[in-house]
Amino acid sequence: MKRLVNKVSKKSGLPPGSLVHVGERKTQEVRVLLVEYNEKQFNIKDIGEIKACCTQSFENSVRWIDVVGIHNVDLIAQVGAAFNIHPLVLEDILNTNQRPKFDVWDDYTYVVLKILHMDEESGEIVPEQVSIVLGKDTVITFQEIEGDDFIPVIDRIMNDQGRIRKMGADFLFYALMDAIVDNYFTIFEKLGERIEAIEEALIANPGRETINDIHYMKREMILLRKSVWPLREVVSGLGRGESKMIGEACLVYFRDIYDHTIQIIDTIEVFRDMLSGMVDIYLSSINIRMNGIMKVLTIITTIFIPLSFIAGVYGMNFKFMPETEHPYGYFIVLGAMAFIGLGMLAIFKMRKWF
Amino acid sequence: MKRLVNKVSKKSGLPPGSLVHVGERKTQEVRVLLVEYNEKQFNIKDIGEIKACCTQSFENSVRWIDVVGIHNVDLIAQVGAAFNIHPLVLEDILNTNQRPKFDVWDDYTYVVLKILHMDEESGEIVPEQVSIVLGKDTVITFQEIEGDDFIPVIDRIMNDQGRIRKMGADFLFYALMDAIVDNYFTIFEKLGERIEAIEEALIANPGRETINDIHYMKREMILLRKSVWPLREVVSGLGRGESKMIGEACLVYFRDIYDHTIQIIDTIEVFRDMLSGMVDIYLSSINIRMNGIMKVLTIITTIFIPLSFIAGVYGMNFKFMPETEHPYGYFIVLGAMAFIGLGMLAIFKMRKWF
Amino acid sequence: MKRLVNKVSKKSGLPPGSLVHVGERKTQEVRVLLVEYNEKQFNIKDIGEIKACCTQSFENSVRWIDVVGIHNVDLIAQVGAAFNIHPLVLEDILNTNQRPKFDVWDDYTYVVLKILHMDEESGEIVPEQVSIVLGKDTVITFQEIEGDDFIPVIDRIMNDQGRIRKMGADFLFYALMDAIVDNYFTIFEKLGERIEAIEEALIANPGRETINDIHYMKREMILLRKSVWPLREVVSGLGRGESKMIGEACLVYFRDIYDHTIQIIDTIEVFRDMLSGMVDIYLSSINIRMNGIMKVLTIITTIFIPLSFIAGVYGMNFKFMPETEHPYGYFIVLGAMAFIGLGMLAIFKMRKWF
Amino acid sequence: MKRLVNKVSKKSGLPPGSLVHVGERKTQEVRVLLVEYNEKQFNIKDIGEIKACCTQSFENSVRWIDVVGIHNVDLIAQVGAAFNIHPLVLEDILNTNQRPKFDVWDDYTYVVLKILHMDEESGEIVPEQVSIVLGKDTVITFQEIEGDDFIPVIDRIMNDQGRIRKMGADFLFYALMDAIVDNYFTIFEKLGERIEAIEEALIANPGRETINDIHYMKREMILLRKSVWPLREVVSGLGRGESKMIGEACLVYFRDIYDHTIQIIDTIEVFRDMLSGMVDIYLSSINIRMNGIMKVLTIITTIFIPLSFIAGVYGMNFKFMPETEHPYGYFIVLGAMAFIGLGMLAIFKMRKWF
Amino acid sequence: MKRLVNKVSKKSGLPPGSLVHVGERKTQEVRVLLVEYNEKQFNIKDIGEIKACCTQSFENSVRWIDVVGIHNVDLIAQVGAAFNIHPLVLEDILNTNQRPKFDVWDDYTYVVLKILHMDEESGEIVPEQVSIVLGKDTVITFQEIEGDDFIPVIDRIMNDQGRIRKMGADFLFYALMDAIVDNYFTIFEKLGERIEAIEEALIANPGRETINDIHYMKREMILLRKSVWPLREVVSGLGRGESKMIGEACLVYFRDIYDHTIQIIDTIEVFRDMLSGMVDIYLSSINIRMNGIMKVLTIITTIFIPLSFIAGVYGMNFKFMPETEHPYGYFIVLGAMAFIGLGMLAIFKMRKWF
């Protein structure tokens, strides 16, 4: 089961800016990738130490340093020192409990977001924290694990697709955020399919697992909301030009992401409303079924109990019971029983009980 | 069943502005209609290629290019090239997952809306996406399928009804949006009738289909809300004059559409509230019925079970049972049974159980 | 049953400003009343044609034209022509689906409101649409039917009560709106009495009609809200002086109406909350009752079923059953039965089942 | 039962500013008290007519006129004339349906509030309306009945406690409002105790009265909210200095009352949330109990009904029933019955039914 | 049980600024600690009287006076006199019913917050009130009991960790608030663990205690919300620089606390949503179980009651019953019973009742 709150207790009491990794350690190796490009050249290499990326290799180049494995506190501290990042920001990078937000500093803009991964087997959504620092001609990304969400961006740089090679670091920054938001659409598509599958099961053959699935999805939605809602504020702030690092020409792209974000938030609300509706459907179907069962019980019981009583009366062992002496007594009583039984059925029919 | 989320995965990873059609392909042919008019003349023709509409045929004319079939990516790209539309806008035109919105660009204003179609047989509401681009003296509309919502506008142009021939492209733009909002009223009228029919069924003879209908309508409302709520923002923005393409004289008309939009939103909320109320009525009517059934069961059972017990006692085969020897024993016992049965009935009557 | 949505389909496709009456035609005759007064004189007459009221009969007079019967499109068109009212406004006057709102035009201010009528027999609330146009020294009112809500205002003019004869058209406008808001208080008083009656029934003897009444009132509240909420915006806008037609001296009166409007909105919310609470009370009382019935059933059944079983055992016809031979067998078994029955009763007593 | 809406019908149709008392007449006598003081002297006397208080008896004095019994319309009209109060304000003073609000006029500020009284016997909360008019060096209060909420203020004036004698009319005004808000804390303390008592009863021994108490308290909260929420707006407006009558030095005291008001609103929301939670607890406890009853019924029935059937079989009077001839038949059947009964018990045990 | 509202009645009627302790007296001793430091020196001592801390012992020092035990009214009054604190602030310090808030005065800023303590045994959350007064180079804290939340700050001062010794009183103020907010994370971690434990119990084996635990946690959340929500406003106000006491350099730290506060509020909302979801799961699991029980009851009853009736018929003592004379009558009836019983089972199987 996913932890609701990550342990932060090991950190409390430390002075602000203390670098401590907070969150589950996902066991991947540490990796630092340097992607450098300008309109004419590009260069991608795995580098061992941070110093290697501190200077531009060619003129007017955009450098993207992609750091995977934020549990390595030393590495993050080195990056911080090399690029002059404030200790409070480094602290936020290391603490995977962050809420999506953006902070505008003098020389750079810091954004923290969540990438969603869906566990193939359990179907559970696992959020991963991604921090992006946008400097003048540098973008630094910090990921918890090595994912494939940024690969299309690398491909575009390598193949000189679209405008990415012609634009600055702010466009790269946009492309990365766009890749993350695209990742949300992919996840929500899968969630939508799952909700539709539950909905079909609900109509066809609702059972205990159906309601458990609904409740599970509702729980996921509660947690997803926490990741997605603040995104709106982040993207809208960037689109309004609150960061000086993002040029005028780029703002329109952020407004495009903003539209996508609103779509995602709409979708999450639609999912929540539909799941609530599904709980109601489930409960009313149980109610209807219970009602049906009660009717069967009541019809059978109310027909046969009086009849059994009559049979019981003539089963009594009194010496003197005139009816039992009568030659047709037995048949008369059987006839009376049939009459009572059918009469009751007729009453139930009239009351539309079946 | 309507898809909750359209597949967008084929698009993720592509650079922004990549033209890919997202959504279900509705199989209609592609058609481009050119409507050109000024106060004195008009000209309506089906054209094969886009170039044909790039120049005005007569002085001070307003040109309306109506493109049906947005799954044809090439065609949309041609229109984009001919009228100098930004790739991000073209991308939005092709992606049928858009949320209603408007974007103000330097030379044109882009609006995306939903037209609602009601499937005649299943009664399902199917949203269709309509994009409108308003230029200086040009309006370009993009529809998924050929519908009849714009026909009254064409008729008005042909018959020179109202002010449309005397006004500019902004008035045409208004007339088209007004036609779309009128379409909503028509759909909501039908939905209102359906809700009233369900309400009557709920009072007359509620059954399993009644509750299914209610839940189905609630689901429709959730999805309609998603199409209708953002409309408010669009129309209010246009009415406030946020687009330079819309002249002062036209703003009052947009404020009129704004009033209609608020009415539609009000209606949707009233429908939602009423449907919620109907679920409550249904559940309480099931509860009341269950209560009634329980009472019948309990009355019959509690009257006859003790009587059957008495009959059982005198049906025992003990050698020595004094009562059975008594000549009037049988009648005394029958009398006692009648007394107990009627006494119980009296108690239930007193407790107002029936 | 009240229609949720009035037919507007006959209107869709027409150019804006087309004059079509939308709504149920309430069969009253058409009537035009002219009330003209200044500080010294007054003149009230039923007039046949609109021209009669186009000129002032005496100096500095305020003219009030009260038009009843808005289904007569020609008449409304004449009024529009005589007083130079914009076609969009005339369209709104004719369309009884309007949401309360006010529109400020250069020469006049247009307000549309709802008067509530309570059907004496069915107790149903029927909203009637009233439009008021306030010009420089003219007030024109448009009603669907002839009501008695404006009679006190006419009386005040005739009897020179209060300040009405000394003030201008804006004060008359205020007096009419005040009369409408007073009408709401009267209606809400009656609704409050009905809710209290239901509440008493709910405590004394809740039945199926009680819950139906509650749901009916909830439905009424949903529809009333739609009429009342927008009123707040209308009155607050007028009180803030958004209409140039209303003089400074009059604004304080509109702020007074504003207070009343807030009171009405508060009341509607209190009613809604109370009705929701009453549904809960009803459901819990049904639950409690069901619980009580179940207990009776269970007590009777669990006491007598084992006893009947014992009687059944000794009613078996085996050749060799030692107990039946015993001279006191019968009495011993009866004693055992009494012991078991009383023991069970004691257990139920202990468990506080009764 | 408290009236939801006071009769206002006798007033509708009258011109604005007509003085009519609206509300229940609480039978107390009419009383006018004049409290006059400056830093050195003070004078408290019961006065018969209003004129007596129109002039200051000593220099720089603050005069407080406390009028009890607003059903006396003549008296209120005299006060209005003596202090030049606008007819609309007098109308509000007489109408006990007012929502708490403040009105800023040129020469005075008018505030209307609710004092809450708790009926000692029934525990019902009865709101009383208090109007306060703050002039330059005069405070006039209008109460429905003679209460003891203002006594501490009089005591402080008499004993020269605190700063009250050194400050102006605005501080007196503050002191009176503070006394009213303190009254709320006292009432909420009692309500909190009652809610805690219900909560304990809910855990110890929930019954029909428990749920009735909860619903009663919920109803009270709905009505209290109506009195308390608008208070926030009143106090915040005064604290922001919207009234010129209140000096700079006094504003900080109003901000203090504002904090108290927020506390009260918080408390009311906490109470509402807790009462909703208590309804849920009650319903789930009824559900659990019903479940338990059903289990007992089912266990007893399902064990004994098959056994009774077996006994019934051997009670049949067929001529030829081989088992009944068998010497141990009876004991074999008894054994089989015991086996079946215990087996069923074992199954229920396994299913954790008891 | 925690008191919902603390007694404030002993205070009502007193003039504003009267110093009275409101709240439960937690029996700890009174203690005043003086911590004084500058970049080079520090000095920590327990002092007996307030005068001892009125002058700085060394140059440019920051003084922190930590007062524990606010039930000692005299002590608080002395502090107030020594540092010239307004009586209204002192009144707030003594009243433990305060809602978190900040007040900006000319010479100091007053903040009141809640520290949360979790009772080790009962797991109950007990809020403690902490007041902080920030002067030019003085910080005064007032606690109800001696806690360990401020110890890390003292440690940092003693060990010269981080920047605290190099910064002014505003940074100390920040460090204390940060310590309090860290305390919230610790508490919420524990609450999250408890909620997860309840969730597991709910799936594994839900019982009466499970639902009681859920309701208990919901109640805690209602009370926590009251402590936590206003914190947001406090921290955001300080971060926006509304207090002149806090220097520019320090504002960024308050924005960091603001992020933490939002995280805490998010968490509380997630907890609330999850607990609501858990109530639904519980209720639906009870419903499902009840449904199962009803099925068993109905199956057993509807199978055996008709069979028992047949047995009863042949147990009647009529003289002439042809079937009983038949040599195979008994076996034919047994066969018929088996057929009916199995047929019923088959019907139930078909209806998917088991």
Image (spheres, coloured by chain):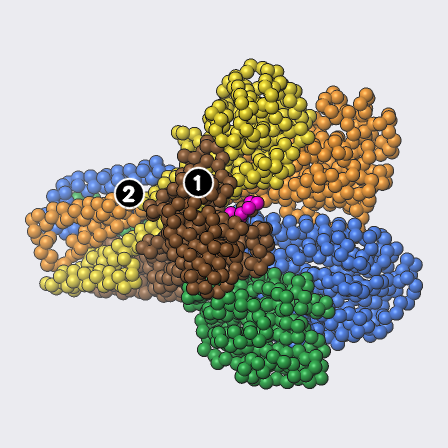
Chain colours: A orange, B yellow, C brown, D green, E blue
> Which chain letter goes with mark 1?
C
Residue lying farthest to the front in this orientation: C58
Q: Is residue D133 left or right of residue C298?
A: right
Q: Is residue D1 at all visible to an observer of this figure?
A: yes
- Residue E299: x and y in percent read 33, 45
Q: Residue at x 74, y 44 (%)?
A: A95
Q: Amino acid at mark 2?
A: Phe
Which of the two discs, 1 and 2, sits closer to the camera?
1
Q: Residues within 10 Å of mark 1 (few under 14, many from 20)?
A: some
Q: Is residue D13 above or below residue E71?
A: above
| Chain ID, mark 2 | A
Q: Position of residue B61 (x, y in %)?
A: 58, 23
Disc 1: which residue: C77
Residue E254 in the magenta stretch? The answer is no
Please name whichever residue, C177 or C52, is drawn nearer the observer in this view of the structure: C52
For marks 1 and 2, give the CA distance: 60 Å
The circle on residue A354 is: 2
Residue, x 75% and y 34% (percent of image)?
A248
What span is in magenta? C105-111
Quadrant the C terminus of chain E occupies: top left
Amino acid type, callout 1: Ala
